[in-house]
């Protein structure tokens, strides 16, 4: 299988991910001089919104274009009366210099409208947004949710516009932090997928690539907008957020039942994942976690992996079906419609996360354990997610980024820094809705099926372990590790982007 695209501006290269050849563009600050050509015909970029992605993307775009002397104006568009006006001003966007304004006024004057308001707001306002866009303008998205919503109601984008997407595989603050940290090493950032959904102008591919390069993406790979929203909404309900939340809750209780103190149980579950397991995966690959174990620890991993894989995959397949059918999108829209009556609370007040605060305050990074049972459960769930996506026809670049890289290089570092509960409480509304809905399902099914199988002495499934050891995704992950940012994200360095998305 081969996936190829071409560019009139950037050099493309072919890489082999397992049994698939794909075309990518490798980023870097040395490509910034090509941005004016990629953005040819664009005088005004309107970044609409100020949630997770908008502060990071707007600042990265502005700084990259300024570095090469471009006079393209990057303007923030916000709803009238928004409290985010002051935050945007704090990042250097002002009404006086034309870089900050009311959202529909900004949309009217923009040649590229990068729509980064919440998914629910996009579903509510899309007709007004399309009507406000000037002829020939391009609509830019960083998530395929709007297409999914339009599909679900039998509508589509206006045919007279280009529609593109650049989708960083990480939360907004990490997009900005790595961009800032990479200034001295020819760039660092978050990988991005890109999609060209409509190309009336014939220039949409290069515009999308230029946008991603300006964000600091180490490499960009092609997808479709429909494939993106299926994999993205699915992934955040799986190993990126919902599944890891459920895994930690279930293991925290299990380890206490086995006699551990609450602090040790948290250390062996949550801390083992966010402070050890994912760091190994980030630089050496998934299988490296398994290969580092020996003796009884390897047997413990095998037992946990064998017991957890199929229960986790059962839930993951259900999630994918719900997303691809449009049901999950409708759930988000319905949840948004009742939010005023039933506001979303926080989850960080339970015993698990209160103990977690204490453990983090006393943390010694060098003493975080690699718990083999925790590793078996986490890795089996990650592999189950990978298999669901591959079976649905997603390319390896998308599968690895949505199931591995976004988890280990973007989200888990924040979970380690502030806690899994913090991430769930402060992610986007769509991700928060999905994580809260599906985390209990992972929790329950692991407790009821996987752990009982272990406790009852069910034999290890040797075929399942062989499939894991010989899985072609390991080669794809290894290739992606070569393309990772040149620096690890630093969560303690000064940054010009906000960390908290939702109070």
Image: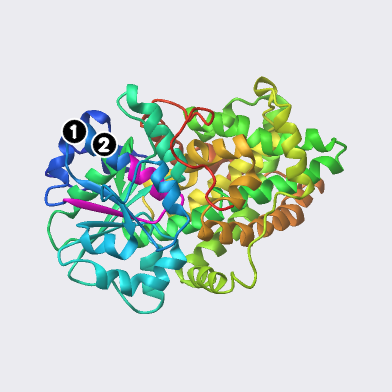
Say which quarter of the image contains residue 181.
top left
Q: Which of 459 and 503 is in front in this view?
A: 503
> From where the camera sits, is residue 153 visible?
yes
Q: Can residue 391 be seen in this view?
A: no
Q: Position of residue 354 (x, y in %)?
A: 76, 42
Secondary structure, mark 2, is: helix
What range of the chain is rendered magenta?
43-59
> Left of 127 or right of it: where is 357?
right
At 26% across and 46% down in the image, what residue appears? 211
Point 50% across, 66% down: residue: 321
Q: Residue 64 carries which label?
A: 2
Eyeballing the image, is 482 above or below 318?
A: above
Crowdedness near tag 1: few (<14), some (14–19) or many (≥20) residues, C-alpha within 10 Å: few
Looking at the picture, how far across and down is residue 264, in whole percent?
79, 33
Asked where in the image residue 130 lies, by quadrant, the reply is: bottom left
Tell me where residue 202 appears, x and y as whole percent: 12, 57
Q: How far apart are marks 1 and 2 (CA)?
A: 7 Å
Left or right placement of residue 389 versus residue 46 in this view: right
Residue 240 or residue 32, whichever sits in front: 32
Q: Mark 1 points at which residue?
A: 68
Q: Does the magenta stretch include residue 35?
A: no
């Amino acid at each position: 299988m081969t996936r190829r695209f071409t560019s009139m501006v950037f050099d493309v290269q072919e890489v082999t991910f397992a049994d698939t050849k794909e075309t990518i563009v490798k980023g870097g600050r040395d490509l910034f001089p090509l941005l004016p050509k990629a953005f040819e015909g664009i005088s005004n970029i309107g970044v609409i919104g100020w949630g997770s992605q908008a502060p990071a993307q707007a600042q990265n775009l502005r700084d990259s274009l300024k570095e090469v002397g471009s006079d393209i104006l990057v303007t923030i568009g916000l709803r009238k009366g928004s409290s985010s006006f002051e935050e945007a001003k704090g990042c250097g966007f002002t009404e006086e210099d034309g870089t900050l304004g009311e959202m529909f006024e900004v949309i009217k004057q923009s040649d590229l409208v990068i729509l980064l308001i919440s998914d629910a707001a996009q579903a509510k306002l899309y007709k007004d947004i399309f009507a406000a866009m000037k002829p020939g303008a391009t609509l830019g998205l960083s998530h395929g949710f709007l297409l999914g919503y339009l599909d679900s109601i039998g509508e589509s984008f206006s045919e007279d516009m280009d529609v593109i997407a650049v989708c960083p595989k990480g939360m907004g603050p990490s997009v900005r932090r790595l961009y800032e940290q990479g200034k001295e090493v020819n760039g660092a950032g978050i990988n991005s997928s890109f999609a060209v959904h409509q190309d009336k102008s014939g220039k949409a591919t290069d515009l999308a690539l230029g946008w991603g390069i300006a964000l600091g993406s180490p490499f960009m790979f092609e997808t479709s907008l429909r494939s993106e929203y299926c994999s993205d909404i699915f992934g955040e309900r799986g190993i990126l957020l919902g599944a890891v939340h459920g895994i930690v809750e279930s293991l925290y209780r299990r380890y206490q039942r086995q006699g551990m103190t609450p602090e040790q149980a948290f250390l062996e579950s949550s801390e083992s994942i966010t402070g050890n397991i994912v760091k190994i995966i980030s630089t050496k690959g998934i299988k490296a976690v398994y290969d580092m174990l020996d003796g009884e620890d390897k047997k413990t991993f095998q037992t946990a992996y064998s017991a957890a894989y199929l229960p986790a995959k059962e839930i993951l397949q259900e999630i994918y079906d719900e997303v691809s059918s449009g049901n999950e999108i409708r759930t988000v829209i319905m949840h948004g419609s009742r939010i005023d009556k039933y506001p979303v609370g926080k989850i960080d007040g339970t015993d698990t996360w209160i103990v977690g605060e204490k453990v983090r305050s006393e943390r010694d990074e060098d003493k975080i354990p690699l718990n083999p049972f925790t590793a078996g459960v986490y890795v089996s769930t990650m592999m189950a997610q990978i298999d669901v996506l591959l079976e649905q026809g997603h390319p390896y670049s998308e599968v690895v980024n949505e199931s591995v890289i976004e988890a280990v290089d973007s989200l888990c570092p924040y979970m380690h820094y502030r806690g899994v509960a913090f991430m769930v409480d402060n992610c986007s509304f769509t991700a928060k809705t999905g994580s809260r809905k599906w985390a209990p399902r992972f929790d329950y099914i692991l407790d009821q099926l996987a752990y009982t199988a272990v406790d009852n002495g069910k034999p290890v499934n040797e075929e399942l372990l062989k499939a894991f050891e010989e899985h072609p995704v390991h080669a794809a992950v290894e290739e992606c590790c070569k393309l990772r940012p040149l620096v690890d994200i630093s969560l303690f360095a000064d940054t010009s982007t906000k960390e908290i998305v939702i109070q």
